[in-house]
Image (cartoon, grey):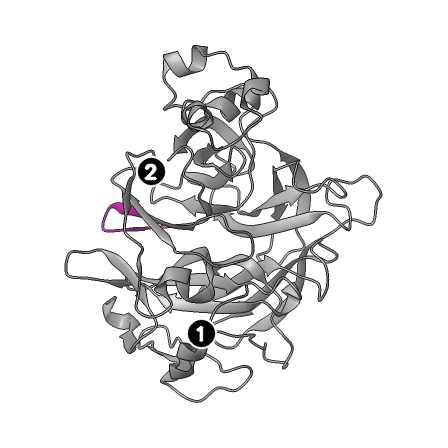
Amino acid sequence: MTNFNFKFLGAWLVIVASITGLQAQNDSTLKGKDEMVPAGVWNDVNGEYINAHGGGILLFDSKYYWFGEHRPAKGFSTEVGVTCYSSTDLCNWRYEGVALSVSEEAGNEIEKGCIMERPKVIYNKRTKKFVMWFHLELKGKGYEAARAGVAVSDSPTGPYCFVSSSRVCPGIFPLNMTEEERDMQWNMEQFEEWWTPEWREAVNKGLFVKRDLEGGQMSRDMTLYVDDDGIAYHIYSSEENLTLQIAELTDDYQGHSGKYVRLFPGGHNEAPAIFKKDGTYWMITSGCTGWAPNAARLFSAPFIWGPWTQHPNPCRGEGSDKTFGGQSTYVLQLPGNRYLFMADIWRPKSLMYSEYLWIPVRFDEEGMPYLTLSGKCNLSDGR
């Protein structure tokens, strides 16, 4: 990301982690129990750059597994695949290798040169499989495919076997789309000009849902969430990045059950990161401004299906209007009902060297989550 003043980061962020021993690293150097954490390019235990962008973390058997996009020094396509790093303290990261490799086979859905973004991994206790979902664009097709890819493994570190890719719930209407909206007939030629009042109204009523109904809903920036009852959900930017959708997964986490809803039609949200605290679901997203940063958005709901309510920008302090230069990718729940917001500071001229920004989620006296880079944060009290 460009056009952002990072001088305030010279103050650094101090994280104290008394329960998990969470520390942070200034590049490859550790400084002790109370660590100052800059946003930056981080190194693994071997001194190599951590290349795991747009990712998320799985906690399994007391170890953290960080999955992310392996980005090239130049260009935007995927030449390697999804990488995996492991840690017991969220500080010292060991490179575990490529969890899901691109294919050398011409015409394969994950052929080298495709685009694989936002990988997330969850564990299915019933099947004892690790299931990875990611946003997939086919080689040479730009961003028109808008598919969700699935891969599975018997081990958290992989290798993961690619299963399939598709759009979401073909032929099925969202649960919260009214009968009137389902019956509407749209002439797409009438809406070639975007952003008109008529176009906005049509989008809100499901213009793109109907357009994509037969082949399935678009799925770009995405995340996964496993609820307390073991039901998993796929949250993704759909309808030309104009509308968020939440879709329930099948029992094996490898497909969609057919249940899904639309959130904030026409709201232009992407980069969803979801978590739950004390029975309330929270979601942080970004706006759609390409690689450039923008103000984060905060939503809450009493149930996963909604109704969802939008709140003010959760970021506070200097740089809050640009999410401190970052874009959300995941919120990790830590032991002790604590949460860690993960973001990427994109460097489109060399995506490999995009930076990481991790901020503890604090909660004010009214229970509202917020993010700040100022002062100390003690993760042990969740504030």
Magenta stretch: helix, strand or loop mostly = strand
Q: Quadrant of residue 20?
A: bottom left
Image quadrant where residue 187 sits: top right
Per the image, label 1 sits on a secondary structure element best described as loop
Q: Quadrant of the N terminus?
A: bottom right
In the picture provided, is 168 more to the left or to the right than 12? Answer: right
**Closer-to-camera residue (181/91):** 181
Mark 2 highlights which residue?
Answer: 304
Q: Is residue 280 magenta?
A: yes
Q: Amino acid at mark 2?
A: Ile
Q: Over which residues does the magenta segment extend?
A: 275-282
Q: Residue at x 56, y 83 (%)?
A: 28
**Is the C-beta separation of discs 1 and 2 under 8 Å?**
no
Left or right: where 260 falls relative to 68: left
Q: Which residue is mark 1?
A: 89
Q: Is residue 369 left or right of residue 184?
A: left
Give left or right: position of 9 versus 192.
left
Q: Residue furthest left?
A: 365
Q: Amino acid at mark 1?
A: Asp
- Please tell me in which quadrant of the rendered image residue 59 appears: bottom left
Q: Is residue 124 visible?
A: no
Question: Residue 101, position in %: x, y?
Answer: 72, 54
